[in-house]
Image (cartoon, helix red, strand yellow):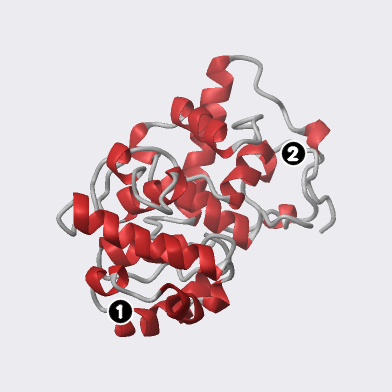
Amino acid sequence: MAGNDNNSVTKTPAPQGKATPPKLVPRPKTAADRAARLKKIIHLLDRMYPAPRTPLTHRDAWELLAATILSAQCTDKRVNEVTPGLFRKYPTITDFANANPAELGQDIRSTGFFNNKSKSLIGAARKILADFKGQVPQTMEEMLTIPGAARKTSNVVLGAFYGIPAGVVVDTHVQRLAQRLDLSKQTDPVKIEQDLIKILPKEKWIDFPLQLIFHGRALCVARKPRCAECPIDPICYAKDKNLSG
């Protein structure tokens, strides 16, 4: 998932002046210090992005799964522009299962990697019809047997639609912010997810990554993050902080 979102954001008064230089930010020295810092980060994100919702438009679990497959290397905004017409043309999971791969590929061309995504959508629909009676499953083990549904996609559907905290979504924003906020030193998404699972309360597994995604789009962007406006600035010692006002 990438790009713009429609999630409502509660504005928190921005710090005045410039961002705090990393060397002036106290670093946690003990496990208790790290836990206390994480608690502050969670509190600040809860204030900025309360009750976050997935920005992918959907009406049921299948539509969310299809939209999440399309969102790979594509903005959510673009996916939301494509899916209304797509779901009108293919209104049921059976319609996707019986779709012509080349024609479906053209229908989703603007999302990128359309040939692979077409195969994944058709394969996913056929798998769900054959093995799960047409219903998107509700366990990680079953989700991972579906074409196009790796851990990130599975976590999106299980968390956002079913409310099941099976794991933590790790997209490019979560990966970047987990490293910047010193919540993980890993670069592999699976290992980052394992780190976040270890330190986050289970009741935050669904909301926390969504909040990181929205924060990664609003302030903690990849280049020239808006650190001076960020309420997390006083406890952030990322090496690539943007110190300008």
Question: Going 65% across and 22% down the picture, which residue do you hit?
Answer: 28
Q: Name the residue under label 1.
A: 90
Q: Mark 2 points at which residue?
A: 238
Q: Nearer the viewer, residue 98 or 190?
A: 98
User: Going by the picture, which residue comes out furthest to the left?
Assistant: 133
Q: Can you give x and y, in whole percent of width and height, for residue 121 in the image?
A: 39, 64
Which image quadrant for residue 164?
top left
Structural distance between the alpha carbons of marks 1 and 2:
46 Å
The amino acid pointed to by label 2 is Ala
Which image quadrant for residue 119?
bottom left
Q: Can you give x and y, in whole percent of width and height, for residue 66 in the image?
A: 38, 65
Picture layout, residue 104 above or below residue 157 = below
Which quarter of the rendered picture does the C terminus lie within?
Answer: bottom right
Determine the secondary structure under disc 1: loop
Q: Is residue 53 left or right of residue 220?
A: left
The amino acid pointed to by label 1 is Tyr
Q: Residue 102 carries which label?
A: none
Question: Going 50% across and 48% down the picture, which residue do you hit?
Answer: 45
Question: Going 33% across and 54% down the picture, which residue do you hit?
Answer: 160
Picture layout, residue 160 above or below residue 29 = below
